[in-house]
């Protein structure tokens, strides 16, 4: 039997272990989960040198594989990023434990008291690319929400994920929780992904975290329910009444702060009236910052721009590139976003309350923003401590998926000898 032939039995065992651990986690007290998360955070910081060394191995592998600069940026770990990872675990630990929280409660004339109470989903499968910090974030959020998790990281982050996972298990053991609560698939073999997508007996929901190719694969082949995290084709519409200084700061931050994250601006829409008053200042600022601006129409006349091609709109560049276009009013911006967006994050910069309200009402993106950079599309920035991804579907979870979004609910019904007529 070769290694490929052993994947099925191995994944079945991992799934069975996760299901058993989920039963324990469902009734684990908040104090034990807190202790596990703090212990894991401490272990990550104490072992930062080993994690960074493991990441260096991954970088060599990724360079040989030909990863893009944006994907390399997602992969790289240095001391500040490791510190941020540990702080993320502490932030999750400090969050309110969602398990057992009463969502709503009411009494019926029949004498029944009914409570809708948050409960863990069970076993979460997370399949992700590049970012090794997802190992920590996903493990922490699943633990806090009382779920066991099976993590399958990208081949390029294999060594980093393994080192981080070891620290998570240290925290679990210190808190007296089963180490099988957070498991990392110990192989790069893609057959493990297929096994997870078909593991209806062992996994309750799959969360894909990666590019369009990965998410599309998961959605096509999964027999397990999926929390879809689609592309971050984020738009910023600079309205007619936008303050030019504010617009400039927001647009530059949204595109250049970190180009490789899903909240980066990929398309700039400028209202004709703003352009008439203030000229090409936003495009010129992007060019000066080193961004390649693929411009349409009159914007293509701005020196230094590249004429946009049709497929530049609706494209996730994840690089120092963005599309740009002039639009005639808020409805034209809305129509463009409906045609080319991915329902992730879209923003309006405006001083007009009515225009902002119309933008918010007419678009159905998971996150809509006014006068703020799309780079805030992040669970940590939403006060969730961390996120397992940005869900762009419409069922169960939308937007940043934190610990609360990783719960379901059940009804607890109490009577006093109640019988039905």
Image (cartoon, helix red, strand yellow):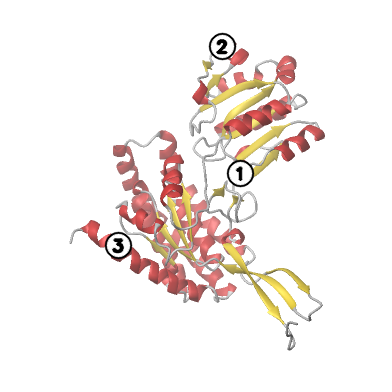
Along the line of sight, which residue is nearer the eye, 270 or 30?
270
Instruction: Give the side of residue 189 with respect to residue 79, left or right.
Output: left
Image coordinates for residue 8, horizontal then vertical, percent: 30, 62
Comes first in the chain, label 1 or label 2 = 2
Q: CA distance from mark 1 to mark 2?
A: 32 Å
In the rendered image of this protein, does residue 26 appear above or below residue 331? below
Dividing the picture into quarters, in which one does residue 354 lie?
top right
Secondary structure of the residue carrying numbered label 3: helix
- The residue mark sitting in front, 3 or 2, is 3
Dividing the picture into quarters, in which one does residue 421 lie?
bottom right
- The residue mark sitting in front, 3 or 1, is 3
Name the residue tied to disc 3. 8
Find residue 377 and name its label: 1
Instruction: Give the side of residue 351 with respect to residue 35, left or right.
Output: right
Dividing the picture into quarters, in which one does residue 263 lie?
top right
Name the residue tied to disc 2. 303
Q: CA distance from mark 3 to mark 1?
A: 37 Å
């Amino acid at each position: 039997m070769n290694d490929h032939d052993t994947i099925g039995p191995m994944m079945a065992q991992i799934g069975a272990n996760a299901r058993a651990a989920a039963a324990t986690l469902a009734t684990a007290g908040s104090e034990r989960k807190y202790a596990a998360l703090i212990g894991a955070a401490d272990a990550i910081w104490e072992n930062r040198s080993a994690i960074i060394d493991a990441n260096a191995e991954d970088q060599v592998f990724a360079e040989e594989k030909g990863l893009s600069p944006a994907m390399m940026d997602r992969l790289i770990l240095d001391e500040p990023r490791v510190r941020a990872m540990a702080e993320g675990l502490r932030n999750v630990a400090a969050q309110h434990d969602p398990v057992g929280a009463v969502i709503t409660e009411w009494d019926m004339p029949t004498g029944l008291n009914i409570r809708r109470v948050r409960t863990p989903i069970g076993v979460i499968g997370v399949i992700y690319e590049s970012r090794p910090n997802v190992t920590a974030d996903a493990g922490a959020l699943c633990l806090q929400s009382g779920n066991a998790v099976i993590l399958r990281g990208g081949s390029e982050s294999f060594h980093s994920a393994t080192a981080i996972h070891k620290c998570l298990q240290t925290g679990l053991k210190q808190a007296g929780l089963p180490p099988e609560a957070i498991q990392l698939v110990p192989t790069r073999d893609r057959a493990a992904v297929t096994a997870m997508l078909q593991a209806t007996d062992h996994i309750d929901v799959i969360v894909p975290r990666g590019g369009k190719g990965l998410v599309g694969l998961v959605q096509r082949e999964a027999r397990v329910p999926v929390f879809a995290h689609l592309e971050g084709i984020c738009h910023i519409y600079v309205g007619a009444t936008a303050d030019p200084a504010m617009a400039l700061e927001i647009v530059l931050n949204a595109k250049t702060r970190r180009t490789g994250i899903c909240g980066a601006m990929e398309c700039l829409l400028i209202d004709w009236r703003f352009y008439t008053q203030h000229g090409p200042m936003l495009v010129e600022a992007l060019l000066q910052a080193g961004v390649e601006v693929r411009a349409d129409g009159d914007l293509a006349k701005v020196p230094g721009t590249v004429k946009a091609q049709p497929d530049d709109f609706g494209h996730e560049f994840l690089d120092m590139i963005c599309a740009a276009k002039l639009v005639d009013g808020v409805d034209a911006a809305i129509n463009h976003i409906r045609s080319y967006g991915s329902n992730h994050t879209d923003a309006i910069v405006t001083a007009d309350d009515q225009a902002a309200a119309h933008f918010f009402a007419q678009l159905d993106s998971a996150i809509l923003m006014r006068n703020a950079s799309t780079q805030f599309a992040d669970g940590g920035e939403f006060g969730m401590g961390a996120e397992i991804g940005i869900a762009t579907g419409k069922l169960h979870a939308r937007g940043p998926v934190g610990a609360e979004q990783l719960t379901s609910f059940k009804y607890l019904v109490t009577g006093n000898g109640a019988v039905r007529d």
